[in-house]
């Protein structure tokens, strides 16, 4: 749920006048995303999406995110296209915030993905990884294995208050992850947050990917592990191997996995579960009382972490290893 | 700021399947209105607006509101058109709430109306009053002069806590209003909440009226008095007689005011200021701490009430009486 910033009419008009996107017919604040303020614009030329970047997104990183979307669209990936203003810039300022207009992407995110959605996802993820190969900018993954330790340390007391004994369990887990984390897997630009919220479908067909504001350079297989966590568990916590197999097979048909990537999957899945468990714990512990955005429940990622710890080989994900 | 209800995909799909409005391409929760949950729908046939009625709107009154919009559209008023489902009904159920789909109305509400906007408003208001003449349903104005006393009594203590002495001032004012309120002015269906939020413009042209959920049967001139309050005061509290004259002249060019209506204007304006002052005081006093919707400031309506009390004749609004 978003729209944090009210934009004065005159400022919006002046901002839009710097673009060649027609006459504004209507605009609506959108209850979507929790990081930024989003508006849907109708002009006589079409539908656009306006984002005002609130403080959680660093302004210095916006050229990477917008440049990446632009790069991907040029290579045939369906994602929002940053619209350039009359000066040729993708980034402007509105209501004292960095602001960008992108093309509006039609589609609906599925709340309960089915195996057929995982097939579409796997294919799109592999295409994304290949399309990003020659993107010139780079961004370090601030939430990679090296970042989890400091994040954990910053809320260790809160974690033990949340669930006694959990800090000790995560401490051990972090030691394993840090020691065994593979550092030389094939890598490039990854989405790093490809949850069902960020994948649009029209009918059963994937219509596009959105929200590249966690994109960074990291191992491709780690992105796949994030999707295993985000798409292949049921509401009751059980792992749906049919969905996992659908996702992995579709991915490998576009970009075959190397043996080292396949071998690393269980550990990468543990790491990815740890990453979302830690940020959710952090958000819960640091959540201002009475704030409107309800923090996400960390528990489901603890369940997933424990599941992956018990996976003996990639066969546990339906892969023939 | 709205969107209170999350709608499960399957339920939305099933609901839309009862309509003949094409295939859903996308839907977005809209941060608009504080009473209901609103969604903007794109289908391959066009753009629509879906409203889920939350508890503040009585389900029994929805046929009046939807029927009125339908009636007005038939008579050439630009307002959202209720879309009938395949059974011919304008009202359905979704996510355990009454729900309706209306046509999407393009346009932008002006935050700081200018005299040219007041001209457009006056004309549209008069057209609305005339178009509603033969509407068959009726709805009592629950917030009319007879309702202010009970509303005041229900929060008298809170009002005195808010501003010592204010309850006494309002008590006297209510006595005057009740004694002198004109009961036999020309009447019919009025909008009763035609604030700038609820009037859309494209450029300088009025493109439509929205939010009929306070519409009721009452004196036409009272609707005009509501607009005088909502459109003709500056942010610093001063009354802009140029805007008032623009509004009233444009109105009378479409629907001439009777002498009794003109004569009653100062009292109607006092009453209308009282109505919004009381509901804002009520909302402020009964506002749950930490709730997301910030209550509106009652003070500006106290200033307006006092202004109108000092208006000696309709000439004070720029009318030649």
Image: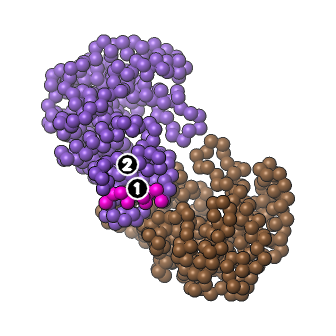
Chain colours: A brown, B purple
User: Cβ–Cβ below 8 Å for labels 2 and 1?
Assistant: yes
Q: Which region is colored magenta? A: B10-20
Kindly identify the residue that appears in the image at 30 percent across and 53 percent down. Answer: B87
The spot of residue B186 in percent (x, y) is: 19, 26
Q: Mark 2 points at which residue?
A: B92
Kindly indicate the quadrant of the structure image that contains residue A86.
bottom left
In this rendering, the answer to whether B84 lies above or below B301 is below
**Chain at tag 2:** B
The prevailing secondary structure element of the residues shown in magenta is helix
- Left or right of B306? Residue B132 is left
Give the CA separation, mark 2 to mark 1.
8 Å
In this rendering, the answer to whether A159 lies above or below A251 is above
The spot of residue B247 in percent (x, y) is: 23, 35
Q: Residue furthest front?
A: B87
Kindly indicate the quadrant of the structure image that contains residue A14.
bottom left
Residue B318 falls within the magenta-colored stretch:
no
B65, A246: nearer the viewer? A246
Q: What element carries label 1?
A: helix
Q: Can residue B271 be seen in this view?
A: yes
Kindly identify the residue that appears in the image at 46 percent across and 56 percent down. Answer: B11
In this rendering, the answer to whether A225 lies above or below B159 is below
Dot 2 crowding, Cα within 10 Å, few <14, some 14–19, many 20+: some
Q: Mark 1 points at which residue?
A: B15
């Amino acid at each position: 749920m978003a729209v944090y910033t009210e934009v004065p009419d005159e400022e919006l008009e002046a901002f839009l006048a710097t673009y060649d996107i027609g006459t504004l017919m209507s605009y609506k604040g959108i209850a979507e995303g929790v990081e930024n303020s989003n508006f849907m614009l109708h002009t006589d030329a079409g539908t656009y999406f306006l984002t005002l970047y609130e403080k959680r997104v660093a302004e210095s990183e916006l050229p990477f995110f917008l440049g990446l979307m632009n790069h991907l669209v040029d290579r045939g990936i369906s994602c929002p296209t940053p619209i350039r203003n009359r000066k040729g810039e993708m980034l402007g300022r509105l209501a004292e915030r960095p602001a960008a207009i992108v093309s509006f992407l039609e589609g609906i995110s599925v709340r309960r993905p089915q195996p057929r959605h995982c097939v579409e996802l796997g294919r799109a993820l592999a295409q994304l990884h290949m399309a990003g190969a020659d993107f010139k900018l780079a961004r370090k993954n601030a939430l990679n294995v090296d970042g989890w330790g400091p994040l954990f340390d910053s809320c260790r007391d809160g974690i033990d208050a949340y669930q006694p004994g959990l800090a000790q369990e995560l401490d051990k887990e972090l030691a394993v992850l840090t020691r065994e984390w593979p550092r030389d897997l094939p890598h490039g630009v990854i989405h790093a947050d490809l949850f069902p919220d960020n994948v649009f479908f029209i009918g059963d067909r994937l219509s596009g990917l959105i929200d590249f504001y966690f994109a960074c350079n990291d191992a491709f297989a780690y992105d796949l592990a994030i999707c295993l966590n985000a798409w292949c568990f049921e509401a009751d916590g059980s792992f749906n191997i049919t969905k996992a197999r659908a996702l992995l097979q579709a991915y490998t048909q576009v970009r075959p996995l190397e043996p080292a990537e396949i071998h690393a999957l269980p550990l990468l899945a543990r790491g990815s579960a740890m990453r979302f468990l830690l940020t959710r714990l952090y958000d819960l512990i640091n959540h201002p009382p009475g704030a409107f955005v309800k923090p996400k429940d960390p528990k489901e990622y603890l369940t997933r972490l424990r599941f992956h710890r018990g996976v003996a080989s990639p066969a546990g994900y339906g892969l023939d290893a």
